[in-house]
Image: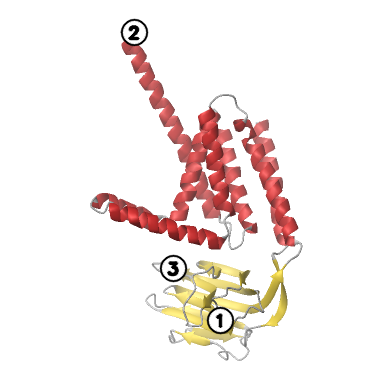
């Protein structure tokens, strides 16, 4: 009991410190003037373009705008284009948003959302991080903010408030686009959090790493934890590039086994139900749960360490460029850890029965 209590207490203290540092030390500070024309909608449509002009789709109330889409086969966008030069290395887009009964469409991006999209001189869309917020269902007013870095290929950006093939209402107010610069104190907070996280994870894993014997399980644990941390610390742009290469490799594998129709269909179904990065989340923590279970006899201790490891890696993403911690990822990680624990229990039970049967046969 003391084992569980101490780890939970230290974990809670770590979480509070990380959240405090994140709230008190923003990565960027706003420095420039307002870059949007008519950002408070006092002149309604002035400076903005509307795509998908459905009857009654846009309404204004003071400084608020509301997009209403009742037709799931239609896409509704409210946009403004802004020039971007290297004189502004960072832009921060922020707004207060509220959703009312937004029902998503068939694709993952069919939501109520606020995005900043970068375009080349030729008008080509650049596949770079662009989300500020995406909303579903009904939610109260909440402030959203995201900072984007200059890209040499980007000639301009478009600010889009969208309801693409999703029904419901999306309201916005206090929309702002300003130049920003890095907070000089932020790196200090980042180093502090990374050091605390490293110390906390070492504290969690130390009993397993110092255990005598079972060298194979310990090596597997170290390699698994290293792979999880590498994935956690990847900036969003690098993660996207790796994801593209992994996708190409998987496509080549699917093509190579296309003759086995059933196998190809299974792979396609898995890819549809769960994105590849979620599969990697699940698989990594499945291995983590498996190796921890092999080194720790108590399942409650194993699950506590899996949960604390998952929470720690997600919180670290608050301090990684372009990454966002998600509760859903923690749940996927924990489910993977549970399955890893069950796999080892099943394997141990199976081997024990096989050994018992073999011993009985030898005695006979």
Note whether residue 11 is visible: no
Q: Judging from the image, what secondary structure is the residue with disc 2 in?
A: helix
Q: Which residue is mark 3?
A: 104
Please say if the residues under marks 1 and 3 sit with CB atoms less than 8 Å apart.
Answer: no
Residue 147: % across, % down:
63, 70
Give the quarter of the image for residue 62.
Answer: bottom right
Q: Is residue 251 left or right of residue 144?
A: left
User: Among all residues in the image, which is located at the extreme top?
Assistant: 364
Quadrant position of the N terminus in the picture: top right
In this view of the protein, which residue sits in the foreground, 144 or 227? 227
Front label number (1 vs 3): 1
Mark drawn on residue 322:
none
Q: Choose the circle earlier in sequence order: 1 or 3.
A: 3
- The residue positioned 75% from the left and 57% from the top of the image is 188
Q: Which residue is mark 2?
A: 363
- The residue positioned 41% from the left and 31% from the top of the image is 346
In this view of the protein, which residue sits in the foreground, 25 or 86? 86
Q: Which residue is mark 1?
A: 156
- How far is the residue under mark 3 from the one under mark 2? 65 Å
Q: Judging from the image, what secondary structure is the residue with disc 1 in?
A: strand
Quadrant position of the C terminus in the picture: top left
- How far is the residue under mark 1 from the one under mark 2? 81 Å
Mark 1 surroundings: few (<14), some (14-19) or many (≥20) residues within 10 A:
some
Q: Choose the circle earlier in sequence order: 1 or 2.
A: 1
Residue 325: % across, % down:
58, 56
């Amino acid at each position: 009991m003391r084992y569980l209590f101490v780890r939970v207490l230290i974990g809670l203290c770590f979480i509070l410190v990380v959240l405090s540092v994140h709230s008190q030390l923003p990565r960027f500070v706003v420095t420039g003037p307002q870059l949007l024309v008519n950002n408070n909608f006092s002149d309604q449509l002035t400076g903005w373009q509307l795509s998908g002009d459905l009857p009654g789709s846009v309404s204004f109330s003071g400084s608020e705008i509301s997009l209403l889409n009742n037709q799931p086969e239609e896409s509704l966008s409210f946009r403004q284009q802004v020039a971007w030069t290297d004189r502004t290395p960072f832009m921060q887009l922020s707004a207060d948003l509220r959703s009312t009964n937004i029902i998503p469409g068939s694709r993952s991006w069919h939501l109520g959302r606020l995005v900043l999209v970068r375009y080349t001189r030729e008008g080509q869309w650049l596949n770079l991080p662009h989300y500020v917020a995406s909303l579903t269902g009904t939610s109260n007013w909440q402030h959203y903010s995201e900072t984007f870095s200059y890209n040499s290929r980007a000639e301009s950006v478009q600010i889009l408030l969208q309801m693409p093939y999703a029904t419901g209402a999306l309201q916005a107010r206090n929309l702002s686009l300003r130049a920003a610069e890095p907070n000089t104190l932020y790196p200090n907070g980042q180093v502090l959090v990374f050091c605390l996280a490293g110390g906390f994870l070492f504290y969690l894993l130390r009993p397993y790493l110092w255990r005598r014997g079972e060298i194979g399980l310990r090596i597997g644990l170290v390699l698994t934890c290293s792979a999880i941390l590498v994935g956690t610390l990847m900036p969003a742009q690098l993660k996207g590039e790796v994801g593209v290469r992994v996708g190409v490799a998987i496509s080549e594998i699917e093509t190579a086994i296309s003759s086995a129709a059933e196998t190809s269909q299974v792979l396609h179904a898995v890819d549809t139900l769960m994105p590849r990065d979620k599969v990697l989340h699940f698989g990594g923590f499945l291995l983590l749960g498996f190796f921890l279970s092999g080194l720790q006899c108590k399942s409650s201790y194993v699950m506590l360490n899996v949960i604390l490891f998952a929470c720690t890696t997600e919180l670290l993403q608050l301090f990684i460029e372009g990454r966002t911690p998600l509760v859903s990822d923690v749940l996927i990680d924990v489910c993977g850890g549970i399955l890893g624990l069950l796999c080892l229990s099943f394997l141990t039970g199976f081997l024990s029965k096989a050994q018992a049967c073999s011993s009985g046969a030898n005695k006979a």
